[in-house]
Each structure stands twice: as structure tokens, then as C-alpha cells.
């Protein structure tokens, strides 16, 4: 008899706690970003396709499905580190097959050589090149992600990738610029 | 906490002020340089006027190299509400417009107009506004803008924006506090030109109509206080306040707190609490601009520090390289441990990277301290959490928490501790017993955060554009498909309607097209170009064919014979063209030919064409605009190809 | 020509960490003199032993951690720890007590936590507590004031006792603690505690020769000397008033309340203030910046907490004095105190307002 009542009591208790837990799970549900969005947030959005996917979002989807995290040269070490901590995997070195980390560049069209073929306009993943057929094209520098995709299609090789130079407004204080000696 | 106007005024009239938390008392050392009136100095041979000397947008250049300019002539034009022009500081010739080391902590080169002075110092025609009270306010604001006046206390904010606020102003505060040690430029300016400063204040009062004007001066400048009191005594609305000496009392936020007990909201502006602040130097410049029409071409610069044998204040033209000022102040390099010239004061100034750095509108001091005056670049010791920094912080921040987080790159934590409310006054680093360069850590963290934010913004923008493009492509694709479907449908219907008649028409059209094609092919067949092309791969073949086709057409139209004599290389032939038009054409042709020659060389095949038949020659006979264009395309394509081929070959060679 | 590039400010005060630590040690001199006067040379001898131990320990550990130990020694923080240990432990404690304590303070409490600035606990007090728990007998046998002792001890006696356990005349520590009339004398706080546990009143307890004018004999003057040193530290702005005021205020409040409630069972506030290591604790130990709270409001709370704990442990706890325990307990609370006492930043309405948006203006906006 005691066993029965104990079992009933325990059963009821279990039921109550189960209900509470279930209620809490619904009530306090945390709306988290889907994984793909979080990964996409970390990627540098150059849309360069060096990872082998047509843009950052497709690569984010691939990572979510288990692809390697070290295929993004524009993001470099920092992006790999962030991805590693998000995905809970170990950070690896950048996969050299996809390119090497480089300084930030923007495309520049040597305008007197441009023949107005619009091939680069079609190649640009972020619509950062302005122009029309048989008209000279130009790159909107602020919008250019430096992805390199417009260079190959150009039939006259008039597009250069120019490293972004430092100006007083983009200059940053560096810790190393003053000789701080650490002791103990 | 927010004191109302009446209580503030009654308290000010009693001679009582508020206080701000923290602050430090570094040795003032003002007497080093404030003994003599501001001296006029000789004009340097070369002046370097940086085109952007304020916070905001750079104006567009309005002079060219070689131009003769008169003193006061604008060198840039204001193109945006946030841009102010710069002016020629003296008469002379523009000898260069190029990047030059800037008056910025980084010393990175900025676009600079270099003027070689003719030592005549001749003014351009000036338009003073004498009856400013009768003129519309917009006119005066415009004059201030065109005079290139930007806040002369240190930040360089365009003054005309601060002279036309959208909100009501209760307090107009004239900042003559000059709390940084050593600097005496404002002190001397108030002593020597109190009257003109007051005139500037009059103009500002006319523009802003504040309830009261407070001229705030630190109590270690009794002569300046007296001079300003005398200058302002006629107007009951002008109150000269003596502020207790404490660094950084001259900080905008701190001075507002001292005088009104109001705090500027964290992301706000002084106008949000009914206050506007202008520096005495700015007032002086406004008076100059309005009453004599002179733009801002000179400012008071304090030359001080023990390494100057003759310290003092001078009127320096904007653009004067500091090496010139070093000569004037009789700078002795050997008195310093190592060369160190600080632009600004010892608390907030920055090291200049070279002595070519020019004086800009915000340069108030050149400090050349001797070995005993500056802290030796010490060794940073561990923080002992003594909180001396927190006690000194005028913004009630917790500097050591900011330090931990900045150092550990926990940027979000640092922001949580209000990193961006730090005014970088340096009081914390000044008192730190462990000699930690705290402000430096904050600057690094701040710029890191700003960069991250910018990168994030850019990435977001790129993502948006990428998505938009994808959508657009999909839309276009869909539209095209629909159109095709519609067209096909229409055709089908039309066919059904017209029956055989339509079919006949189509057949006829097809036949016509075929005939045309055949004709073209037969025409091409006679072209030697095709023969050459046929030896090459198919892709090139096509291009060559297109070029050849174009040429054939042209030839048929003109039927003129080439005049050149036969030479061995097609490139040489190109040289003999005479008219300008021909030169252009010829160049293109030459390029094509060159490309071809190169290609040939690469292939190591013998050139098969006879010189007269070379496409380069034929190209010369073309003349219509259409043709030229086409040719250009062809030439460019050929050139590119040649380049690529050469590269390929080089690579091949290398691999061999 | 390129010049050197440093970040502003280019000036700084001349007082560095080493100077701060040295000033604190100078301020302890009056107290040290008083302690020597009343309780013999023990404190000085222990200081010598402790100083040697801490310097060797610190140098060895920094060498192991591959850091430059020369500057760390020069900053005098380890010497200050040695001084605090030396004046906290009983004058006749054996030499190895000091050695173990000093080693523990530097090696375990300070360096293992990351060195100066990273230690959670006050090294001297953590060492004291460790010693008290490990060697309760040695750590509770305080000598009695020289004037009251049957056998006053000289300098060489002190050395002899510390190293051999017997004075140069062959007296044991127990003998040395004998009062003129032949009884062993305890410290005033001990005496009071024992008396009250035997249901005696405070008035009866202070009849004991360990008291003088209702205050601890000798102890009052030692505390008074530390108070003078503390006031000097306040005056030269090495420490802030917040923590000492908190400690004194805390103990004063509670002891006054209890004294008014029942003056038969609870000693007077004045007795509490000038007993044991209170003044030394308030001005020299609780003010250790590394392990104390860092905000002004937090410091007052930190001090008050110490004062309350000292009184509570003295009155109801198992130990006669409690500076060390109180300080350690409050050390643990520091992160919490700091978090909740953040000052209101200029221009912010609430104290914990989080800045979300990044302000993109140059913050060098000094006047205009």
C-alpha cells in the first residue's frame, strides 16, 4: 500500500514538474537567430566566391551543413576564429587552396581604356560598378568589397585592384606605436 | 539636477560656481610665455596650407599649380554645409598641390597647397560688413563660413554651424579658460585684443540672441580677466567669470558644468541644455571676418617649453611650417633628451612627426620641453587598482575598468563602461602611479570599435546589395521567360491565323539570311587575315574574323589604296602617318598589329601575310566614327590578348 | 626628420608605485616604535626575517615566470606585505612562522594569482589567517607590555626567543608572559572574552592588569600611533578617507548600539577602537588598493563591512581579534560592491545605462 501511494505521489510530482518544464520551455523560449544568419553575420560579405560558393550566404549555408570554416581568405584568421567559437569547433589555418589573406583592396577602372563592354558590371556581386553599354564604366569605391570578380571578365584588362591607402580619417592608434615596456 | 536659468544667474551673481568631479593640478608654467605681447614674425618662404583643417568635409580646390594668389584668396570652395574654405595666408605663387605631412598624430600626408611667398603680403580685395545689425543673419553666417573660421579652441568644428543653431540659447559661453599648462595664446589674445574679442561676441549675440553671455577665464590669468572686464563693462548682459584653476576646466562639458551645473547628455550637444560655447580665438576671428572682411589666415601660437630660448606668443600664418617657428623661438635641440615637439599642450597635444608639419587653424601651441619637463618614456607597471585615476576623472568614469577591458580587447565591456564618454583629457594617465598610458589604451580601443563598426556597416551594405542584386536577377530572368513565352505564344497564334502565307514568309526570310551569310563567307574567304587566323585556335579565330570582316566592309566602301611603302615590320609602318586623325587610327592599328606580331612570335610561326595585305595597313583607310570605335574595340581586345599570351608564355618559359 | 611618437599626456606626477608603498611604510613607523616600546623588539626582528623572505620569494617566482624582477622588487609592494605580516604576528612567535607566512603571502596569494594588481586577497592578511588556522598556539600567544612583565626583554632576548624559543636568560615564552605578580597575562581582548564567557561583567573584566584606564594597556598607545600614521597618509593623499572612515564608522556604530543596549556585556566603543589591530587594520591593511573596492561609494561600504565583521567576530566569534577575517571576507565581496557602486558617468541619467550605439564623433572636443 505504501509503495503504491509513494508511486502515485512520485508520479504526480513528475507530472507537475513535467508540466512546469514544458510550460517554461514555451514561455521562456529564446528566439535565436537561425545558425545560417549568425554565420552570415560573421562572414565579411565580400561576396568574392573564393570559398567556392556564389557569395557569402551560400557559404554560410554550407558551413551550417558541415563545410569547413577555413575557406574565406578575405575574412582571414579573425573570421575563422569567430566561426570556430560559434560552431564550437577548433580554429584551423586558412585553406591555401582558396587564396591567402590580403590587405583590403578596391577595384579601379582605368577609364580611358574601358571599352564599355558591361562584362564587369555583370560580374560585380554587389552592383558597385556603374556604366552602360559602350559607355565608360566606373567603380563606386565605397560600395566595392574588393572581391576581384570583375578583373577576369574584363576583355581589355583595364581593372586594377588597388590597396586601400591609409588616411588621417582611417588611421588608427596602434598600441605598438609607443614603446610600452611591460614589467612583471 | 537640471538648474533653471534664474537660480543659475543668482548664483553666478553671488560669485559662486559649481564644480566638476575629479581634475588635476599639473604645474601651470604659463609665465614662461605670457610675458610679452603677441609678436609679429616674418613670413616664411614656403607655406603649406592643408586643404582640410576642420571637422567635416573637405572643400573643392579652386586654384591650380602656378596660379598667383593674393593674401586672403580662397584656395578651396565650400561645397557642403560641413566644409569651410582655406585661404592663401600671404600673396605668392602656388608651387605645388600635393600630399604633405599633416598636423595630425599620425602625420599621414594630406592634400596640401604649397605657396611660395613673394614677401609683398598683398591682400586681395576685402568686403567688410560694417552694418551687420542691418544685414540678415544668413548673410553674416555666410561671411563667417567664407572666412574659413573653424573652432580655434582645439576641435576645429565649423563655426558657422555653431552660429546658426536650431534651438534657443540661454547661455553663450565664451571660453577663455585655457586650462592646459604652458599654453598662453588665449591669455595673450585677451590681454592684447580684448576689445576685438568683445566685438566678435557682439556679432555672436546678434546671431544667437542668448539670454546672457558668460566669459569664463581661469583665475590664474588676472590680467586677462581685467582686460575682458573692461571691454565688456558697457553691456550688462556680459558677465566675466573667474573660474578656479583646475585641469580640465576648459573642456566644453566641464566648463558647462562649472558655470551652469548642467550636463550635456551623453549623445547630445551643448545646445540640448541651452548652452553654446565659443573660444575667444574664434570670437576674434569672427570680428576680423565681419568688420574687416579678413578671412582666417593667421592665429596666435604659443612657443614654449624650456628648449625655446625665446618663448612667447606669435602671430603665425596658417601653413607656416613649424621649423620656421623653431627658428623664431630660438629652439635649442641639445636641451632635449631627444627631439620632441608637441603640437598643443602637454596634456592633450600630440607629437609632431617632422618639423615640416604646418600650423593649422587649431594649432595653439608648439611645446618643446627639455629633458626635465616631460615624463620619461617609462616602463608600464601593473595596475594596483589604486583608483587615483577614478578620482581624477572629470567624467566620473572608472578608468581602470576601461583599461582592463581595453587591454583585453573586450570592446563591448569597455563600451558598457562608457568608453565613448572619455574626453581623453589625460588626467587619469597623469596621476597613474604605475605609469600606464591609459589614454593611449582608450584611443586604441576607440579606434578599434569605430573600425569594427565601419566594417560591420560596410558588410551589411554589401550583403544588402548582394541580396538586392540576386533578387533583381531572378526578377529579370522571370520577366524574360515570361516575355519569351508571350512572344512564342503570339507567334504560334499568328501562324495559326495566317497559315501558309506566314510560313512562306518565314522561309523566305530564312533563305535571305542564308544567302547573306554565304556572301559574307565568300568575302571573308579572300581575306588573308582569315588565313592567319585559321592557324590559330578557334577563339582567336573568331575575333580575327570579326576584325577582318569589319575591314573588308570598310575597304569595299572606300576602295583606296594604301600609300605606304613596304617595310619589314607592320609596327614601323604605323610611324609614317601624317594627320592627327590618322595618328590616332594608326596607333590603334599599330597596337593590333603589334599584338598580332607578338602572338605570332609567341607561336613561333612565320608571318604569312604579305606586308601590303597586313590588316594594319588596311586599318588606316577607315575613317567613319563608327568604324574607328569598332576598331578601337578590336585593338583593345587584341592588345589584351597579346598581354595575356605574353604572360602565359612567360610562365611557360619560367616553368621550363 | 622623424621624431619620437608618444601618446598624450606627456607629463605625469612624479609619484610612482614604489613611492606610494614607501610612504605607507614610513607612516607605519610611529606604530612600529610604539609596538617595540610596549612589546619588545620582536616586530622589528620579524620584519627583517619577513623582508628577506619576501624579496627572495618574489625574485625567485618572477624568475620562474620569466619576468623582470628588479622593478617588481623596487616597487616595494612585497616589502610592505612583509611589514604588515611582521606587525601582525605575535612578537615572540618563532622565526619559521614568519618565513612560512611571508612565503605563502607572496608565492601563493600574490604571484600565483598573477602578481601585483591581480591578487584577490590581501596577501598579508591571507597569510595571517593561514598561520592562525595552522599554528593557533604560536599565533595567539602575545607578549605582554614590557612595563607589566616580570622579565622585560632586550633586543638580544627577542632574537634569541624568536630563533630558539628561549630568551638569552633561558626564560620560556610562557614565563615571559608572566605578570609581575606571577600570573600569565593575556591580551585585553582575550581577557575580556574569557571574562564574559565566565559570566563576569565588562566592569569586572577590566579590573585585570591587562587594562589601564578602562582601555587595553599598551594597546591603546600602539593603536594611537597607527592612527597618527594613518592621518599622515590621509594628509599626503596616499589613501582616501573612505575606507578608514568606513571601518571606524562600522565598528563605532555597532559597538555604540550594543554598549547602550547592555554595558555590562559589551565593551565601550572606545575600547573597541583602540584594541587589537584595529587602527592598523583601518589605515594600513584595509586600504591596500589591490584588494579593496575601487569606487568611492564602494570603499565606504567595504570599510563598513570590515568594521561590522570585526565587531561581530570579536564579540560572538571564536577569535579574540578579527581584522584579518573581516578583510578577507570583504575582499571576496569587492567585485560585487564595485559592480553595484559604479558612479554615474557625466551626461548619463542612470548609473547602469548601457551604451549601445557607437558615437562616431571625435571625442577630443576640448572647448568647442
Image (tube, grey):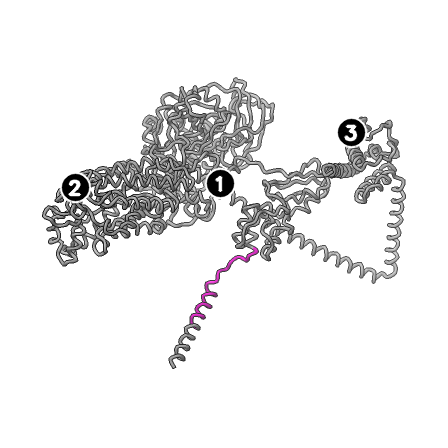
Query: Are the residues tagged 2 and 3 within 8 Å (C-beta)?
Result: no
- At label 1, counting other C-alpha atoms closer than 10 Å, the crowd grade (few under 14, some 14-19, many 20 or more) is some
- Judging by the rendered image, the residue that carries numbered circle 2 is C169
In space, the residues marked 1 and 2 are separated at their CA atoms by 72 Å
Q: Is residue A36 left or right of residue C244?
A: right
Helix, strand or loop status at disc 3 = helix
Residue C354 placement (x, y as % from top left): 42, 49
In space, the residues marked 1 and 3 are separated at their CA atoms by 54 Å
Evaluate whether residue C272 shows in this view. yes
Residue B200 placement (x, y as % from top left): 42, 30
- At label 2, counting other C-alpha atoms closer than 10 Å, the crowd grade (few under 14, some 14-19, many 20 or more) is few
Q: Are marks 1 and 3 on the same chain?
A: yes
| Residue nearest the viewer, comparing C356 with A181 | A181
Residue B447's tag is 1
- Judging by the rendered image, the residue that carries numbered circle 3 is B583
Q: Is residue B582 left or right of residue B474?
A: right
Amino acid at each position: 500500500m505504501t509503495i503504491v501511494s509513494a508511486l502515485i505521489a512520485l508520479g504526480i510530482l513528475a507530472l507537475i514538474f513535467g508540466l512546469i518544464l514544458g510550460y517554461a520551455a514555451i514561455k521562456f523560449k529564446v528566439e535565436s537567430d537561425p545558425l545560417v544568419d549568425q554565420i552570415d553575420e560573421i562572414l565579411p560579405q565580400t561576396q568574392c566566391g573564393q570559398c567556392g560558393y556564389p557569395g557569402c550566404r551560400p557559404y554560410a549555408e554550407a558551413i551550417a551543413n558541415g563545410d569547413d570554416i577555413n575557406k574565406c581568405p578575405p575574412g582571414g584568421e579573425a573570421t575563422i576564429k569567430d566561426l570556430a567559437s560559434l560552431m564550437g569547433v577548433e580554429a584551423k589555418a586558412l585553406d591555401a587552396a582558396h587564396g591567402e589573406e590580403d590587405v583590403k583592396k578596391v577595384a579601379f577602372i582605368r577609364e580611358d581604356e574601358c571599352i564599355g563592354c558591361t562584362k564587369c558590371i555583370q560580374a560585380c556581386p554587389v552592383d558597385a560598378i556603374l556604366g552602360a553599354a559602350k559607355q565608360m564604366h566606373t567603380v563606386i569605391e565605397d560600395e566595392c568589397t574588393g572581391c576581384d570578380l570583375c578583373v577576369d571578365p574584363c576583355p581589355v584588362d583595364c581593372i586594377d585592384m588597388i590597396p586601400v591607402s591609409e588616411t588621417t580619417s582611417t588611421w588608427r592608434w596602434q598600441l605598438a606605436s609607443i614603446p610600452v615596456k611591460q614589467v612583471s | 539636477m537640471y538648474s533653471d536659468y534664474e537660480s543659475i544667474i543668482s548664483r553666478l551673481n553671488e560669485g559662486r560656481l559649481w564644480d566638476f568631479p575629479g581634475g588635476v593640478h599639473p604645474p601651470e608654467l604659463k609665465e614662461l610665455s605670457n610675458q610679452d605681447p603677441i609678436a609679429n614674425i616674418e613670413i616664411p618662404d614656403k607655406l603649406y596650407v592643408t586643404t582640410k583643417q576642420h571637422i567635416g568635409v573637405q572643400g573643392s580646390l579652386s586654384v591650380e599649380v602656378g596660379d598667383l594668389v593674393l593674401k586672403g584668396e580662397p584656395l578651396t570652395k565650400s561645397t557642403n554645409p560641413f566644409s569651410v574654405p582655406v585661404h592663401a595666408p600671404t600673396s605668392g605663387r602656388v608651387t605645388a598641390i600635393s600630399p604633405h605631412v599633416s598636423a595630425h598624430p599620425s602625420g599621414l600626408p594630406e592634400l596640401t597647397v604649397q605657396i611660395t611667398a613673394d614677401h609683398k603680403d598683398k591682400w586681395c580685395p576685402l568686403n567688410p560688413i560694417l552694418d551687420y545689425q542691418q544685414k540678415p543673419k544668413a548673410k553674416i553666417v555666410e561671411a563667417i563660413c567664407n572666412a574659413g573660421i573653424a573652432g580655434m579652441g582645439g576641435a576645429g568644428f565649423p563655426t558657422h554651424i555653431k552660429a546658426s543653431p536650431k534651438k534657443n540659447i540661454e547661455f553663450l559661453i565664451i571660453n577663455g579658460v585655457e586650462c592646459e599648462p604652458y599654453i598662453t595664446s588665449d591669455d595673450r589674445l585677451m590681454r592684447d585684443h580684448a576689445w576685438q574679442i568683445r566685438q566678435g561676441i557682439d556679432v555672436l549675440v546678434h546671431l544667437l540672441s542668448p539670454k546672457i553671455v558668460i566669459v569664463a577665464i581661469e583665475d590664474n590669468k588676472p590680467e586677462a580677466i581685467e582686460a575682458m572686464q573692461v571691454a565688456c563693462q558697457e553691456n550688462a548682459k556680459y558677465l566675466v567669470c573667474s573660474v578656479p584653476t583646475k585641469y580640465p576646466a576648459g573642456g566644453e562639458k566641464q566648463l558647462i558644468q562649472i558655470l551652469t551645473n548642467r550636463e550635456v547628455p551623453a549623445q547630445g550637444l551643448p545646445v540640448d541644455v541651452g548652452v553654446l560655447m565659443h573660444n575667444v580665438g574664434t570670437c576674434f576671428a569672427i570680428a576680423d571676418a565681419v568688420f574687416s572682411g579678413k578671412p582666417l589666415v593667421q592665429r596666435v601660437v604659443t612657443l614654449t617649453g624650456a628648449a625655446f630660448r625665446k618663448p612667447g606668443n606669435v602671430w603665425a600664418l596658417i601653413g607656416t611650417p613649424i621649423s620656421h617657428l623653431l627658428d623664431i623661438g630660438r629652439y635649442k635641440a641639445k636641451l632635449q633628451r631627444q627631439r620632441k615637439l608637441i603640437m598643443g599642450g602637454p596634456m592633450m597635444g600630440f607629437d609632431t612627426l617632422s618639423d615640416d608639419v604646418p600650423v593649422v587653424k587649431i594649432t595653439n601651441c608648439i611645446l618643446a620641453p627639455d629633458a626635465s619637463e616631460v615624463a620619461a618614456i617609462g616602463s608600464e607597471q601593473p595596475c594596483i587598482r589604486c583608483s587615483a585615476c577614478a578620482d581624477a576623472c572629470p567624467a566620473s568614469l572608472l578608468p581602470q575598468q576601461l583599461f582592463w577591458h581595453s587591454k583585453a580587447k573586450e570592446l563591448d565591456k569597455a563600451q558598457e563602461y562608457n568608453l565613448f564618454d572619455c574626453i581623453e583629457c589625460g588626467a587619469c594617465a597623469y596621476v597613474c602611479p604605475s605609469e600606464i598610458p591609459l589614454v593611449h589604451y582608450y584611443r586604441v580601443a576607440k579606434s578599434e570599435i569605430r573600425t569594427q563598426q565601419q566594417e560591420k556597416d560596410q558588410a551589411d551594405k554589401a550583403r544588402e546589395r548582394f541580396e538586392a542584386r540576386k533578387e533583381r536577377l531572378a526578377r529579370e530572368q522571370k520577366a524574360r521567360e515570361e516575355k519569351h513565352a508571350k512572344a512564342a505564344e503570339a507567334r504560334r497564334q499568328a501562324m495559326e491565323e495566317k497559315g501558309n502565307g506566314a510560313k512562306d514568309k518565314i522561309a523566305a526570310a530564312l533563305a535571305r539570311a542564308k544567302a547573306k551569310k554565304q556572301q559574307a563567307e565568300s568575302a571573308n574567304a579572300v581575306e588573308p587575315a582569315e588565313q592567319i587566323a585559321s592557324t590559330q585556335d578557334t577563339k582567336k579565330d573568331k575575333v580575327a574574323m570579326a576584325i577582318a570582316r569589319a575591314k573588308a566592309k570598310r575597304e569595299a566602301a572606300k576602295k583606296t589604296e594604301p600609300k605606304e611603302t613596304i617595310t619589314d615590320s607592320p609596327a614601323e609602318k604605323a610611324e609614317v602617318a601624317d594627320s592627327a586623325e590618322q595618328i590616332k587610327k594608326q596607333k590603334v592599328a599599330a597596337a593590333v598589329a603589334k599584338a598580332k606580331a607578338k602572338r605570332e612570335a609567341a607561336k613561333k610561326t612565320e608571318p604569312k601575310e604579305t606586308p601590303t595585305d597586313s590588316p594594319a595597313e588596311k586599318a588606316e583607310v577607315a575613317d567613319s566614327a563608327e568604324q574607328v570605335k569598332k576598331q578601337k574595340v578590336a585593338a583593345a581586345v587584341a592588345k589584351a590578348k597579346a598581354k595575356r599570351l605574353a604572360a602565359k608564355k612567360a610562365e611557360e618559359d619560367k616553368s621550363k | 626628420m622623424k621624431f619620437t611618437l608618444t601618446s598624450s599626456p606627456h607629463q605625469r606626477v612624479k609619484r610612482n608605485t614604489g613611492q606610494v608603498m614607501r610612504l605607507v611604510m614610513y607612516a607605519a613607523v610611529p606604530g612600529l616604535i610604539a609596538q617595540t616600546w610596549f612589546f619588545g623588539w620582536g616586530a622589528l626582528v620579524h620584519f627583517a626575517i619577513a623582508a628577506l623572505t619576501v624579496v627572495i620569494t618574489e625574485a625567485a617566482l618572477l624568475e620562474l615566470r620569466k619576468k623582470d624582477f628588479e622593478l617588481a622588487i623596487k616597487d616595494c609592494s612585497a616589502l610592505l606585505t612583509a611589514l604588515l605580516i611582521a606587525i601582525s604576528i605575535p612578537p615572540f612567535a618563532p622565526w619559521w612562522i614568519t618565513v612560512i607566512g611571508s612565503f605563502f603571502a607572496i608565492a601563493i596569494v600574490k604571484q600565483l594569482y598573477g602578481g601585483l594588481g591581480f591578487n584577490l586577497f590581501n596577501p598579508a592578511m591571507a597569510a595571517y589567517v593561514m598561520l592562525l588556522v595552522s599554528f593557533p598556539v604560536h599565533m595567539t600567544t602575545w607578549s605582554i607590555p614590557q612595563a607589566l612583565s616580570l622579565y622585560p626583554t632586550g633586543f638580544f632576548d627577542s632574537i634569541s626567543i624568536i630563533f630558539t624559543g628561549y630568551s638569552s636568560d633561558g626564560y620560556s615564552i610562557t614565563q615571559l608572559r608572566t605578570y609581575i605578580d606571577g600570573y600569565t597575562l593575556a591580551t585585553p581582548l582575550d581577557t575580556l572574552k574569557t571574562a564574559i564567557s565566565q559570566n563576569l561583567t565588562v566592569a569586572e573584566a577590566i579590573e585585570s592588569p591587562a587594562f589601564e584606564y578602562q582601555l587595553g594597556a599598551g594597546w591603546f598607545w600602539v593603536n594611537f600611533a597607527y592612527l597618527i600614521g594613518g592621518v599622515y597618509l590621509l594628509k599626503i593623499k596616499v589613501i582616501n578617507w573612505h575606507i578608514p572612515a568606513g571601518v571606524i564608522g562600522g565598528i563605532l556604530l555597532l559597538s555604540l548600539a550594543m554598549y547602550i543596549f547592555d554595558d555590562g556585556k559589551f565593551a565601550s566603543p572606545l575600547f573597541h577602537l583602540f584594541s587589537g589591530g584595529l587602527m592598523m587594520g583601518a589605515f594600513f591593511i584595509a586600504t591596500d588598493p589591490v584588494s579593496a573596492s575601487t569606487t568611492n561609494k564602494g570603499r565606504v561600504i567595504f570599510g563598513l563591512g570590515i568594521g561590522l565583521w570585526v565587531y561581530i567576530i570579536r564579540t560572538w566569534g571564536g577569535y579574540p581579534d578579527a581584522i584579518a577575517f573581516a578583510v578577507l571576507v570583504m575582499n571576496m565581496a569587492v567585485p560585487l560592491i564595485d559592480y553595484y557602486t559604479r558612479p554615474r558617468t557625466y551626461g548619463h541619467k542612470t548609473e547602469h545605462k548601457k551604451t549601445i550605439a557607437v558615437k562616431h564623433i571625435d571625442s577630443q572636443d576640448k572647448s568647442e
